[in-house]
Amino acid sequence: MRRRFDHCLTLIKSKKVRDFVINALAFAPKEFWRDKGEDNVEGGIIIHSLKVVRLIINFCDFFGISEQLTRDKLIAAGILHDVQRNGIPWGANAHPEHGHIAAQWLLLLRSFEASSLEDLYFNTDKDLIDIIELVENHMGPRNKPYPTSALRKVKEGVENKEGYLVDEKAIWHLIVQMA
């Protein structure tokens, strides 16, 4: 089952992003690899994640996102978004806060690599934080414990007809949430 991600990993050109994903997959719970998911077939979560990655690539093409590091971060989020789908410990059903649980788990993995708390807090790569945020908020308005919209409310005093800000990161979140 693990080999199914091999092609996705070759699409990630950034060594730091690819290594982050490889490390996370190495520590992923065994149930992640076998759980039937909603497709009710062995490895259903993996099949679902591969479909998400395919959609992410299509959305990147649609939105004209050609910058490789951005594509790498979105693909990484697609691979990892359900890595703790049924919670910790792994339960029988999807945990309503699985995005948040996965983000905390990914931060914990990063903490094992850090040489000190200062290294963890001040030297955790911004790109890895972007991936963790995408994983945490991948359920969008259905996200628990806090619903998250890809679009952010504009700060007071800034005029915007719809009242929302669409920036590059909003597009990233929208892509992962739609996929």
Image (spheres, helix red, strand yellow):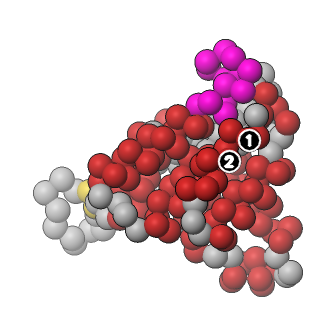
Q: CA distance from mark 1 to mark 2?
A: 5 Å
For the point 50% across and 68% down, the residue is: 69
For the point 38% across and 45% down, the residue is: 58
Circle 1 packing at 10 Å, graded few (<14), some (14-19), many (20+), is few
Q: Position of residue 57 (x, y in %)?
A: 43, 48
Asked which secondary structure carries label 1, the reply is: helix
- Return the residue at label 1: 3
Location of the C terminus (image quadrant): top left
Q: Main secondary structure of the magenta part?
A: helix
Q: Quadrant of residue 153?
A: bottom left
The mark tally for this picture is 2
Residue 108 shows in this picture: no
User: Hey, what amino acid is under mark 1?
Assistant: Arg
User: Hey, what amino acid is under mark 2?
Assistant: Asp
The boundaries of the magenta stretch are: 36-48
Q: Position of residue 120 (x, y in %)?
A: 76, 77
Q: Give yes or no for contact between labels 1 and 2 (Cβ–Cβ under 8 Å).
A: yes
Location of the N terminus (image quadrant): top right
Q: Position of residue 174 (x, y in %)?
A: 39, 48
- Return the residue at label 2: 6
73 is within the stretch colored magenta: no
Q: Position of residue 56 (x, y in %)?
A: 45, 46
Compare residues 48 and 131 and report the one nearer the observer. 48
For the point 60% across and 49% down, the residue is: 8
The disc at residue 127 is none
Compare residues 124 and 48 and report the one nearer the observer. 48
In the rendered view, does 152 fall on the left or right side of 128?
Answer: left
Compare residues 39 and 99 and report the one nearer the observer. 39
37 is within the stretch colored magenta: yes
- Asked if 23 appears above or below 113 in the picture, the reply is above
Asked which secondary structure carries label 2, the reply is: helix
